[in-house]
Amino acid sequence: MSLQAIPMILADKNATFWFPPKASTFAEETDAFFMYIFWISVVFFVLIVAAMCWFCIQYRRRPGYKGDSRALHNNALEITWTVIPTLIVIWIFARGVYGYMDMMTPPPDTIDINVTARKWDWTFQYPNGAIHPELHIPVDRAIRLRMRSEDVLHAFYVPAFRAKSDVVPGRVTVMWFQPILEGSYDLFCAEYCGDQHSEMIKRQGVVVHDQAGYEAWLAEAAKPPTHPVAHGYWLYGRLGCKSCHSVEVDKKIVGPSFAKTYGESFKNTKGETLQFDEEYVRRSVLYPQEQMREGYQNASQMPSFQGKLKENEIIALTAFLQAMKDDAFLEAVQDGDLSQDEAQALGYADEEEAAEEDASEEGTGDTTAGDATTGDEAAADTSGDAGDNN
Amino acid sequence: MSHDDAHGGHGDHDHLPFLAHHFDDPEQQFDSGKLGMWLFLVTEVLFFSGMFCAYALYRSLHPEVWTFASQFLNATLGAFNTGVLLFSSLSMAWGVRCAQLRQRTGLVISLAITLGCASMFLGVKAIEYTHKWELGLLPAGAYESQFLPGAHHAGLSSWLYVLSAVPALCVIGFGIWYGLAMVKKDKQTSEIAGPLLVTALCYFLGVFIGVAFESAEAGEHGGDHSVAAHATDDHSGDAHEDDGHTTDGGDDHDAATDEGHSDSGDHSSDEPDGEHSEDQASHGAPPGKLVSTEGDGPVVPGAPREAEIDQAGGAGLFFSIYYCMTGVHAIHILGGMVVLTWLLVRATKDHFNEEYFGPVDYVGLYWHLVDLIWIYLFPLLYLIT
Amino acid sequence: MSATATSANYSQPDSDNFLINSKGFLSWALTLDHKRIGLMYLIGVMSAFFVAGILALVIRAELMTPGKMFLTNQQYNQVFTLHGAIMVFLFIIPSVPAALGNFLVPIMLGAKDVAFPRLNLGSFYLWVTGAIFFLSAMLWTGLDTGWTFYTPYSTTTSGPVVAATMGVFILGFSSIFTGLNFIVTINTMRPPGMSWFKMPLFLWATYATSIIQVLATPVLGITVLLLAAERVLKIGIFDPQFNGDPVTYQHFFWFYSHPAVYIMILPGMGIISELMSVHSHKSIFGYRFIAYSSIAIALFGFLVWGHHMFTSGMANVTTIIFSALTFTVSIPSAIKVFNWLATMYKGTVQLNTPMCYSLSFIFLFTIGGLTGLWLGALSTDRPLHDTYFVVAHFHYVMVGGTLVGFLGGVFHWWPKMTGKMFSEFWGKISCLLIFIGFNATFLPQFVLGSRGMPRRYARYVEEFQELHQWSTYGAFLLGFGLFVALGVVIHSLMRGRKAPPNPWGGATLEWQCTSPPPYYNFLNPPAVNDPYDYLPLEYRDEERGWEYVRPEAPSVPTSEPEPAKS
């Protein structure tokens, strides 16, 4: 995502000189504590610098002045300046532990969301099975994140929540927070994770709804479109394909672009010529390292989607790739979004209505019973598999 | 060089040829050297301590894997090597004493024995290593499951010939050198070349002893295969696992495992196994590399878990740590052999005496430390039951 | 030992000094003289600093705008890796101990050389080899792991990680051997009369540093060795793909790299202890405390590595213990600052260039130390971890502390090393520029961090731009200040007036020989006295330097440096 494309959202009215908005229950304590330490430090710093300046002037070398070299030791003074800082740091330590234990102890009643981090994207999996690249949560509810990484270290960091935790591959890291302020906040990756580390952010990607808004969003997010092309595009946005494969012709982010590649022939790393066809798409999704395209040997490794994708989803992805040969469709998705109108114009919309790619748009009416079931089933299966594989 | 010029100006050190210009007296020089050596040994201990920590950590996390994997190490060979190193320590200590008493011949002989023992140790180690490479007992990334039948382990490994190339060259080279020295009646040179020739030969002695022990072991209870065969039998109730593999030859392991892998993929996801899903954190990996982490089939609870342990991947980690620790130790043995050779050369020149025996003393300390580390490695790696 | 010996040390022919007593490239390349090795290190670390400093400016320039200025993401990652790695491994760690330490340790001890001169030269060439390895690895295809080589990124990236880790390994052994040499030298080669508590504090700091170098660096050695094995052999110890654990790597790495922070700062503190006393012309306040605190910091430093991993998912208890231990280190550091201030009290303060640098040190190090409180406290560390707050904090300690201390030390001992004085006026100007530039660079970064700007970002969101720009302007001012400082020393080499043996009025032994010292440092064993007793020193206008004035002591040994039996 291009940073320049985002309008300036400067000077949030809740932000202060030092801090972003206080959007979670942690913020009050952490910020207050921050300022206490700040003022303690200011006092010490001013005393030290003032003494330094005063001594420099008072005892400067000048004609007629003779220093007194006997002041070498003063027990009372030395004890004082040892004991006072010691007491202060003990207090700071204790208060830090107090705040920390709060951050580490989730309350019993939480909404659990599974987070998967990969180079260079986040995926959130909701209790109802919905998978979405943004984090949507209700206000005033404790949220617990169970986080996994598919490749390297990442860190989940929402400054407005004052919450951060590393995501360590091979482990499940748990963190929690309770948002108290509706709005949308930035999510950063705070642990260096390679090339696009600084792009692994979700600008306004953490959305705090009121309870009703959250439920409505959640219900909507679980429904994939039924038309295979739209479904494929929907998966493309949600599974993290987007972060490595562009939809612009020949634009290499990490892996090859998806635009106009279907049906082309290409060379693999061994120099054999292959066809980009249905079989190749399937193998690449399941065993990505098997047949790598020439020139991408050094690209960072694509994770396998084996066990995470159902065949019908692979079919949908294939259909989407196939549609990418079409200029009109390419243009439609290149703005980062496939709107309902665009889908309809291209004939990729569902019969009754098109499921929305953009979650912020208002929800839809009914889908046909059969379609809805398929969709839900697919989502639920996907989530189950993904969970086991982590 | 300025240093030499300046040194020339100081006639007062002439009676002490090895007293460096910046020391006041031999005692100060000796103390400095000794302190320096002790500090160096401290760094060596800390260097190894990193690996001991890794060992402790992973053993405490997967004790069963450690017990399982350790049975592939040949404790007899380990014990033999321990004995060899202990003896070399003794001869080294003897050498230090000879140096202090200015017994030139005694020093040369003790150093030769020490070198010979070191070399024999490496010969045995070469047998152990190549045998394991042949069996696929490799670091985690290349570890091959021991429950795949295959034509492993027939006779000597071809790796052994590779490893033996350098000692063989040494035998030839030192042999010629020694011969020439004898022909020329150059006593001092023959005193260097002779022990070195013996040292190189000792490597092959070690190899033969290793082969002998290894085959005796194999004759006694069917060798390492008994472990694999035994466990595979226990597993025979599980048709899926056996059918998947017995039909495949040993040559296409990877293919076989890929099969097993894709077959068992659904099983593993159907069977939620708490501990197991943790182990599978590596789903991002390409299938070919997952031999050790994901090729598991369903396991009947209560059945012997060896195959599962083997394939859950920890065994490879054990061998990683085994190779790192013994490998770094072997490098230290090699380094020790280089400095011992240097001492040997100086000893033949009669450099050491009551006043000046520091280098022998320091190398002795180093050698004892290398020995000591092995004494820890042996029980920690070989004797886990 | 006697006082007349001192004057004998002053009266030597100029041709005998170590810089020119032998000539030719090989006389330097193969020298065993600790002073020449020290100077070669000085040139080496300054070159490394120059390279890494330019890279810092490249980073700051790139961050002028939120989007792309002129570096791609990958190039940016390589540049910050290169900057961090060169600064840490090639500059800060060897700067004071290897460059100044090599020059000063034997002279301050009144010895002729370090205990193992060949090992010392060997360490230098290990440093050179490591540096070549390291630089070629990084310039060749570009290393992008960050200087910390965190797994599993470092085991999967395509960069030349193995070559770089071998470079670190070699540099580590260079550092170990230097430390070992100093410990032995200080233990066995102190002259008669110099008990432990009559040693200059710089030696105490060096001693403490050397302990860390000897005890911690081997662990780094094995860590990078395992990392290389991880890449080459896939041993899996740190790689979750083979059941390893990346957090284990972090423990291993920080077990060295946190003590390494004290390898960086302790010698700087040692320099400041000397500078504050000499330029205040007053004995150091609380000598024993400063000496003990160096050792205490060195030992506590081994127990606090976990504070780099507060968000890595350690157990709560472990985290809390590491937090508590972290605070224990802050106390000795704080008291050192108070002691330095008290040293000025009722002294005769002279604002020479080195003194200006050491006052800057106190100012900047205090900020660096105090901001550590936020990071040591668990609840405030949570949001601040891995943000620009941390970046600013450690730059205040490493640059504001170590670099400024190092520059102060270089100016302080420059006359001794080269025999030339430098321009006081321009020296002070350089100090002022560096001081202002540094604060302008890093103060805004504290605010950036507390507002949530993460580290190692090539691109950032627009809100942060203004502060980033301030920081960039500051960085260029800082760079300019450093160039002025470089100009001052180069001018001094070309045009500087001849330095007296004791231009500042120091009482430690190095001021008792000529500037620059002769090959053997002292023609006669120097008179050992209290290193901070300034009473017998008097200023001589004609020499523009200080001289010992004291009653004649009784009989003197011969002029030859005969082994002095203790």
Image (cartoon, rainbow, N blue to C red):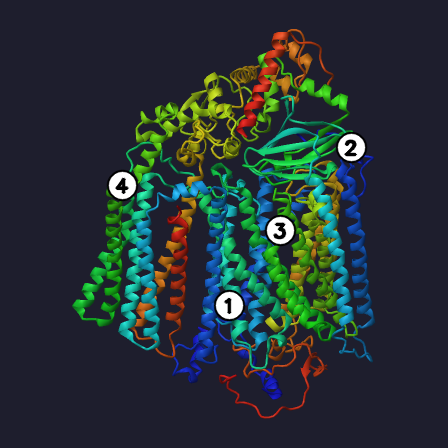
Residue occupied by mark 3: C54
Callout 3 touching callout 1 (CB < 8 Å): no
Graded by Cα atoms within 10 Å as few (under 14), some (14 to 19) or many (20 or more), the crowding at tag 1 reads many
Q: Secondary structure at mark 1?
A: helix
Name the front one of labels 3 and 4.
Answer: 4
Q: Secondary structure at mark 4?
A: helix
Callout 4 touching callout 2 (CB < 8 Å): no
Q: Which residue is most to the bottom?
A: C555
The chain that hosts pointer 3 is: C
Residue type beneath disc 1: Asn
Residue A94, given in percent of the width and then of the height, sits at 73, 50
The CA distance from mark 1 to mark 2 is 60 Å
Name the front one of labels 4 and 2.
Answer: 4
The chain that hosts pointer 4 is: B
Residue occupied by mark 1: C181
Residue C315, given in percent of the width and then of the height, sits at 61, 44
Task: Confirm whether residue C30 shows in the render.
Answer: no
Q: Quadrant of residue B169?
A: bottom left
The CA distance from mark 4 to mark 1 is 55 Å
The chain that hosts pointer 2 is: A
Are labels 4 and 1 assigned to the same chain? no
B12 is higher (above) or lower (below) than B287: below
The CA distance from mark 3 to mark 1 is 33 Å
The CA distance from mark 3 to mark 4 is 67 Å
Q: Quadrant of residue C144?
A: top right
Residue type beneath disc 4: His
The chain that hosts pointer 1 is: C
Q: Is residue B50 left or right of residue B235?
A: right
A200 is higher (above) or lower (below) than C201: above
